[in-house]
Amino acid sequence: MKPAAFDYVVPRTVPEAVDALGNGGRKAQVLAGGQSLLLEMHLERIRPDLVVDINRIPELDDMQITDNALRVGALIRHHVFESEQAVPGPLGSLFSLAVVNIAHPPIRSRGTMVGSFGWGHPASEWCAIAMALDADIRLQGPEGARTVAARDYFHGPLKTARRPGELITSVRYPLLAERTGVGFIEHRRTHFCFAQVAVAAVLIVHDGVISEARIGLVNCADRPLRAHAAEQALTGVGIGPPTDGYRLPEDHPFTRAGRIAAEQDAAPLAEPYADLEYRRHAIAVVAARTLCQAANDHRSRVGRTKGDSQ
Amino acid sequence: MYQWTRREDERLLTGKGRYVADIEVPDRLDAVFVRSKVGHGALRAVDCRAAREVLGVVGAWSAADLMDMPPCAHSAATLQDLPPVPHTVLAKLSSDEAVVGREWPALVKERVRYAGEAVAVVLGEDRYRAEDGAAEVTFQVDPLPAMVTPSAAAADSTLLFEGLSNIALRGEAGKPIEDKVWQDAAAVVEARYRQNLLMPTPMECRTILAVPEGDRLTVWSGHQMPHRLRRELAALLGWSQEQVRVVVPDTGGAFGSKSASFPEFVMVAFLAVKLRRPVRWIEDRLESMLVATRGRGQDQHARLAADADGRLLAYELHIDADVGAYPHLGVGLPMQTAWMATGAYCTPQVHATVRSILTNTMLTYPYRGAGRPEAVIALERSMDTMARRLGIDPAELRRRNFIPPESFPYTTPTGRTYDSGEYARALDLALETVEYDMWRAEQARRRTDPTAKPLGIGLSCYVERSGGEPGGLHEFGSIEVGTDGTITARCGAASSGQSHETVFPPLVAKTLGVDEQRVRLIEGDTDEQPQGLGSFASRTAQVTGAMLQHASQLVIEEAKQRAANLWDLPLEQVEWSDGTVHAAQDGSAAMDISELVKATGPLRVEDRFETGMEFPFGTHVAVAEVDPELGTVQLLKVVTVDDCGVVLNPDIVHAQAFGSALQGIGQALYEAIPYGDNGVPILANGLLDYLLPTYTELPPIEAKDTCTPSPSSPLGAKGAGESGCIGLPAAVVNAVVDALQPADCDLLQMPLTPDVVWRAARAPKLEEAR
């Protein structure tokens, strides 16, 4: 479990990093938090000739809000999002619900959000949220900068639109409007391992009726997904009253949407301890529960703003 | 200042521990093994030439290469061929009969029998270089059908060793039970249980560093039995035991998995001697996933009969054990399960049969619990099924059948003689602690509330065995008193983290009546302590503790004798108190033992002390909430009540109960090594694949104890190291069964992963009995 020999450079600026990555056709890897890369190098599943360590590039350690959008730079660590206040509005709540599912605290203190986009794992929480929210990914390469929408970015397990020689400098998410309801539920065998299934849900509700639903699916296919069919089935549907208990009625709109997500949107793969039958079932259950959580979140936001105005 | 709980803590918890990998010796080489990725096949064409060209690689050899290697060291002149791996003679874990015709070569010669078996070894200046070299070794394995379950291998359609059955051992305990008993019984329950293959998973994997010095070899190893390692290495090198010194430095856990000699150890010692250079092997996690010894691995069939009042009539257990590819380490281990099949009950007839079957998995070997968890799980799951069948509360069914306290010593139908026990007391304390009636009421409430997740309460009343087997129930040691007042205790034990430094010096100090800071412990070094057995089978407190208490008493006797001689008094007029001798009558000042040593010369006593086999017991309770839609299990409460006789240090005993409970939960809910049909473990890429419970899975655990002293040792202490692994898995599974009430309990096989639980939740329920 030792990496093969590699060269190592520590650029101080983005152009230097891009230069290093494009240098001489060598297999280069970007090192940010290293929580996936170093493990893969130890397992020799990745054998780079060159590791480009971007940790000394100050401009990447930056998070900004401009034009009603959040831009997260490549050195922002996962743990930053543990606080709901790190990002304004419901987006901050969604991030804080999701981030605690990323491995253990030591990993979150080092690993980066943008690193998840470099790695492109189907079980990445951030990547599925990016799909749901139509985030876009900013890349800097030898030919300059370009932006790729999340829907065009993920091509398969660990396969993305990023070209060799390109550095992801940031990921941009639209902020969520005030009363947007958000939910994130992850199902996994232990807190340490990858999700068997996780779902991100965002509900825009007016007068109890869903005007827009956005659903991201984690580890429900060979890449992060957005559940378009389930979203459509929810548009114009009332969220109804809160439900009791863990089990939703069979004919509840969220139960139906969960089934649609599992049957039409997801393309799960079998794995040990989760065959296809179990996986599809679990996707339906987790999706329905996450929608419930988002609806409850919406209700409490409405209640809070009412309370504020009194 | 912060007070550390244990003497070891400051060193181990502030990074000052010194493990084998921390030991620097000049010119040391790192060994890396080239391993077969195929589980079963014929080995051809191993070619190490390219590896030898890699920068920093010092040598690379297949088994064939080593046969032609010229002897280069004087001391190794007699060492012609690579010796095979020795087999375990201790506790009948293996035997000459089982291994004859079944050689375990240190490097594969002709046939690969498990995935990860080493086909070549590369030595490099460091691990990085050696791994680069290993990547250049080429070889081919022509696959043979792989057998990864006992039932597949027992058919003998493919033989692991030509001309010999895959069934390497058959055994039984107790007498066969007549059909009539089953026919006449009011209730008979029958079930199949799979005991999942587990990894012991110590934080530090296996380690060995062999340093040749003149005609001696010093071996540093994280090991539980340094004297065994010395004996086995000396034998395979053809040396006398005095030429080998084994030292156990700080060791990061073992759980049974570090008490043998392994193929890699044979290679390291052999190459160090051949090359006259220090060689080490530091197993990494990826290697251990493939080739560390496995625990458990049994397919069981159990049958339990009772009369209408719930009095047990007969119990039958058949075990098909997966012992792995070679019979060398644990072919006899399943007999531990058979001997302990009776459990805590006075069942008149018990019969257990064993088939130890060779398969294409890595070898099974004792892992914390070692044969007793398998016995407890089969019996205690059957007890819960019987309770449901008869409509008797599971606690009450157990109570009706306990061996009563006045029956001890009690010889079971399966041949064990239990030393002492008060089983109902442990059950009562466990029920009271968990608030059993409250949970039963909550369970009933939830059954009428469709919005509530189902809840179950699982019990497990276990008896286990500590100390070891006959022939291995003794330990050696000594106590030395210095003129500076220091008292040094030495023993044959070896710690892999069990707090020996914290427990034993105070025990010696208390016996002698001196300040415990005066006493230090030296162990894990065969030059310091020439004879010893080691630390396994929860024996060290029980056996080594009793030995050190005994040796302390010898010190007192010796001191009194010397004082009598010095003062020219009759022995009976010399008294001992608080580390001093004084004359009984004349009121003169007491003399500290260090002063006595100054006056009379060095004082050192050494001895061997033996205890009986002892049988700790207890009751464990788990309360589980199940999400039937996703199959997740949440443990709301765990109570362990253990009785290990006299407790030497409550903090340490509770820590053992706690740690072993977490490992028991691991077996019940998380851990397993699935194998593909090709004989290759799947999910073997480290601890993201093999899931251990960590602090985030930790339920509220309350550990309590009762005290029934053992009559088998003057200390009265029984072993305390394995209780949670032994008792708790059955309680956890029983809780899930109790929550879901499936008609077919065989659906719930460990580990109870979400998919398994979900399927059981959807299966037909047990009809309401009444």
Image: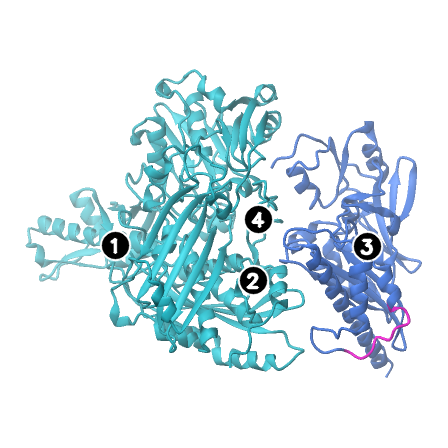
Chain colours: A blue, B cyan
Outermost residue toward the right? A67
| Residue A268 located left or right of residue B349 | right
* Residue A14 part of the magenta segment: no
Label pair 3/4, CB-CB below 8 angstroms: no
Numbered label attached to residue B674: 4
Q: Residue, x 49% and y 29% (percent of image)?
A: B108
Q: Residue A30: percent from the left, percent from the top?
A: 77, 39
Could you tell me what secondary structure mostly forms the magenta stretch?
Answer: loop
Closest to the observer, A38 or B616: B616
In the rendered image, which residue does mark 2 sit on?
A: B747
Q: Is residue A207 visible?
A: yes
Closest to the observer, B351 or B96: B351
Q: Nearer the viewer, mark 1 or mark 3?
A: 3
Say what amino acid the circle numbered 4 marks.
Answer: Pro
In the rendered image, which residue does mark 1 sit on?
A: B611
Q: Say if A185 sits above or below A102 in the image.
A: below
Precedes in sequence: disc 2 or disc 4: 4
Q: Residue A305: percent from the left, percent from the top?
A: 85, 77
- Packing grade of label 1 (10 A; few <14, some 14-19, many >=20) is many
Outermost residue toward the bottom? A310
Precedes in sequence: disc 1 or disc 4: 1
Say what amino acid the circle numbered 1 marks.
Answer: Thr
Q: Residue, x 91% and y 42% (percent of image)?
A: A145
Say what amino acid the circle numbered 2 marks.
Answer: Leu
Kindly state the secondary structure of the residue where label 1 is placed: loop
In the rendered image, which residue does mark 3 sit on?
A: A225
Q: Nearer the viewer, mark 3 or mark 4?
A: 4
The chain to which mark 1 is attached is: B
Q: CA distance from mark 2 to mark 3?
A: 34 Å
Closest to the observer, B379 or B716: B379
Q: CA distance from mark 1 to mark 2?
A: 43 Å
Q: CA distance from mark 1 to mark 3?
A: 64 Å
